[in-house]
Amino acid sequence: MLKKASFLGLVAAIISIGLWLLLNFFNPYSNETNNSTTLITLFMLVLPAITAIISFLHQENY
């Protein structure tokens, strides 16, 4: 059960990064990219997702 939950966390982290890329750089609602918004969302969305991916990979080694 724990393996399924950690795999689900990995999938959620990858989808989160994909959505961040889509909405920051290929936003269908706006043609403008704001550097401060991109930096804030990087720290608030992408870095936790990367941490979750690293956690999943570290867990698999044990």
Image (cartoon, grey):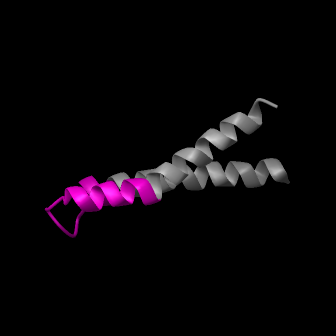
Is residue 56 placed above or below 23 in the rendered structure?
Answer: above
Q: Residue furthest bottom?
A: 29
Point out the image quarter for the N terminus: bottom right
Q: Position of residue 14 (x, y in %)?
A: 52, 49
Is residue 25 placed above or below 62 in the rendered structure?
Answer: below
Q: Which residues are magenta?
A: 22-44
35 falls in the magenta region: yes
Residue beneath the point at 68% across and 42% down: 56
46 horizontally vs 48: left or right: left
Q: Residue furthest top?
A: 61
Point out the image quarter for the C terminus: top right
Q: Position of residue 32 (x, y in %)?
A: 14, 62
Residue beneath the point at 22% across and 70% down: 29
17 horizontally vs 33: left or right: right
Residue beneath the point at 53% across and 53% down: 48
Magenta segment, principal secondary structure? helix
